[in-house]
Image: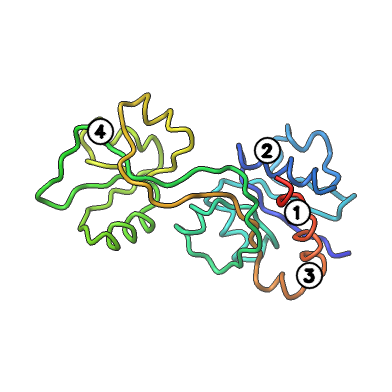
Amino acid sequence: MSQVTIAMPKGRIFEEAAELLRKAGFQLPPEFDDSRKLIIDVPEENMRFILAKPMDVTTYVEHGVADLGIAGKDVLLEEERDVYELLDLKISKCHLAVAGLPDTVPSDVAPKIATKYPNVASTYFREQGEQVEIINLNGSIELAPMIGLAERIVDIVSTGRTLKENGLVELEHITDITSRLIVNPVSYRLKDERIDEIVQRLTAVVEEV
């Protein structure tokens, strides 16, 4: 049985994905959830897990250091990596949205949009026929309208609580987001039987939800 390396994002997606793998019958050790390690070997399943930042998962899979990966659709849309999307795991549901202060008025000049999704934001506003200036930020996107850096933001919205606590409102819904199972194209050819088995077991669990 071929060893399969899976890149997993740290945080909430990791917890939900680990639960999904266990439901699908994969024997993950108890310390899996609490580990501070960046690489976890599970010899019982002939699996290796790489714990990465969410934005890095697609890079690891594209370059073949991981055969499979679990990545949010937001990352896949933004990064546009050479990977195949195998399965919608239907976990970590949220959506991408445009938000701003409630009294935001249209600007005569190209409005500034702050986001950590510059490609997604550019494509969205281009499709709306709106010319904007994109400001790339990596954290605390909600700050931008509050300090006058940008009129609007494009960011992930889950419950909407963070927006509300910072006095912002959702202005436009861009697209729904869930986490997906992705594969390196070469790995899919070389380890197709093993990967298909993993996909089938996960599919059965996902369809029960």
Residue 70, percent across and down? 64, 52
Residue beneath label 1, please?
A: 202
Amino acid type at mark 3: Lys
For the residues labelled 2 and 1, the Cα–Cα distance comes to 15 Å
Quadrant for the N terminus, please.
bottom right
At x 74%, y 40%, the residue is 19
**Mark 4 or mark 1: whose residue is earlier in sequence:** 4
Residue beneath label 4, please?
A: 101
Residue beneath label 3, please?
A: 191
Callout 3: 10 Å neighbours few (<14), some, many (20+)?
Answer: some
Residue beneath label 2, please?
A: 15
At x 80%, y 49%, the residue is 24
SS of the residue at dot 3?
loop
Amino acid type at mark 1: Leu
Is 180 on the left or on the right of 151, as rendered? Answer: right
Callout 2: 10 Å neighbours few (<14), some, many (20+)?
Answer: some
Of residues 181 and 34, the one drawn nearer to the viewer in this rendering: 181
For the residues labelled 4 and 1, the Cα–Cα distance comes to 41 Å
The reply to whether discs 3 and 1 touch (Cβ–Cβ < 8 Å) is no
**Mark 3 or mark 2: whose residue is earlier in sequence:** 2
For the residues labelled 3 and 2, the Cα–Cα distance comes to 26 Å
**Mark 2 or mark 1: whose residue is earlier in sequence:** 2
Of residues 151 and 51, the one drawn nearer to the viewer in this rendering: 151
Residue 126, percent across and down? 27, 62
For the residues labelled 3 and 4, the Cα–Cα distance comes to 50 Å
